[in-house]
Amino acid sequence: MTTPKTFHVKSFGCQMNVYDGERMGELLAAGGLAVADAADADLVVLNTCHIREKATEKVYSDIGRLRKGGREPMIAVAGCVAQAEGPEIARRAGVDIVVGPQAYHNLPTLVAKAAAGESALDTDMPAASKFGALPARRRVGASAFLTVQEGCDKFCTYCVVPYTRGAEISRPWSAVVDEAKALVDAGAKEITLLGQNVNAWEGVDEAGRTQGLDGLIRALDRLPGLARIRYTTSHPNDMTQGLIDAHREVESLMPFLHLPVQAGSDRVLKAMNRSHSRDSYLRILDRVRVSRPDIALSGDFIVGFPGESDAEFEETLALVDAVAYAQAYSFKYSPRPGTPAATMEGAVLPEVMDERLQRLQAALNRDQAAFNAGTIGRRCDVLLERPGKLPGQLIGKSPWLQSVHLVSDAAIGDLTSVDIVAAGPNSMTGAAVIRAAA
Ligand code: 5AD
Ligand code: SF4
């Protein structure tokens, strides 16, 4: 196989994969490779997700598509499927490189090995972090991701993350602050701090004090040029009062919180090993709303966990009614090999799962529409991220993470004042506020 000159990275799944995909791209570009479309690239990196079923089949069908018409690009399988099923994937025809989420700083070496016809598999979880071996951030959009925490020690019984991403680790204070500065220098106005349990982040600041995520957010708030801070995903048990207070006190911290609950029944939560109850979750949200009354709440839900009864599912619907989420994600339970729930009894019938998911999504859509309608008439800043389809149209994000479409002569990357005038199912329409000349 010849040494590739062009590459394409395709990321699936969560925002942490998007971040990893960007960093792999930067690493390959630093090695002299040029970006290309998937259909022409000499090297295609499939940055995979393993959270739900059919992940592996999806990778194989993608590889089949890439090899259509006799093309034989070098193919690297990265991400959580690589971590979970590395050796099996490496044996598949067409796969040249397998690299796990903690080992991708070795991608250039693996590419060289594959080009020399050697086997190229690295799914190590080394003690030293990959981040130090990656090139500095150079060019990013107005809104950038920054992974500050990886892995998970919570071991929810349905979830593969503790196995594919490893134990909870926090990147050091100075590494995060330095990367945030580099992102701002590269054009970022907004940074979203990422972690599987981002609110479990912990570090030691320049003065030797132990800090939680709230301390980090307060430090980033002081960075000149950084207008907005967000963070995701959080676990209820790590929702400290300091972080809740930061939502009132730190102006650049956006009024949005993604706090998954998964289910509304205490029995199901216990079987999921969530280590919080319905009530303790709702009490956290009460405190968050006291701190920041306009906060947009988001969550994740799983329907049809083994043994979930009709009455238990109704408790999820009742919780949704009580919270009124601004938006949320909902999934059918999918058994993952190697997780405790995969061998639990009481599988829920597929048609029952379908019906539950439909009812839940109808309730979530109703609440999302109500939240969006409730922002009509508000004046807020929108961070412009990309052009829209119509001439002069731009698309950006409101503080509550809604997509806002508007016609404006402002530039991408600007934070511009907007009156929200209408709500669609997935986006808002804004009118640029014309400032009177001073
Ligand atoms: N089946 C269905 N949904 C799952 N999630 C995680 N594991 C599973 C699974 N086995 C969902 C959870 C989590 C989100 C990222 O994916 O809701 O919060
Ligand atoms: Fe998975 Fe639970 Fe950890 Fe979230 S908290 S990554 S759902 S084990």
Image (cartoon, helix red, strand yellow):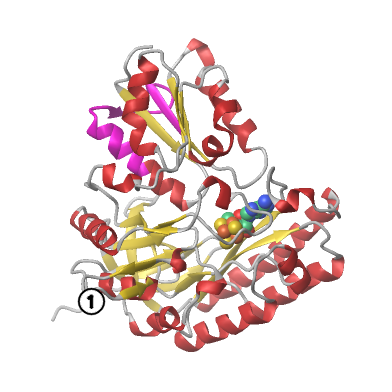
Rendering quadrant holding ligand 2 = bottom right
Tell whether 198 sits left or right of 334. left
* Residue 31 visible in the shown view: yes
Q: Is residue 48 above or below residue 339?
A: above
How many neighbours does mark 1 have within 10 angstroms: few (below 14), some (14-19), or many (20 or more)?
few
Where is residue 264 shown, x and y percent of the image?
Answer: 72, 72
Residue extending furthest toward the front: 127
Which residue is pictured at 80% across the width and 54% down the height?
353
Where is residue 275 shown, x and y percent of the image?
Answer: 64, 71
Tell whether 125 sits left or right of 210. right
Which residue position is annotated with label 1? Answer: 435
Asked which quadrant contains residue 217, the reply is bottom left
Q: Is mark 1 within 8 Å of ligand 1?
A: no
Q: Disc 1 residue type? A: Arg
Label 1 residue SS: loop
Name the residue nearer the viewer: 323 or 32: 32
Q: Is residue 19 above or below residue 92?
A: below
State the extent of the magenta-drawn residues as a range: 22-46
* Residue 407 visible in the shown view: no
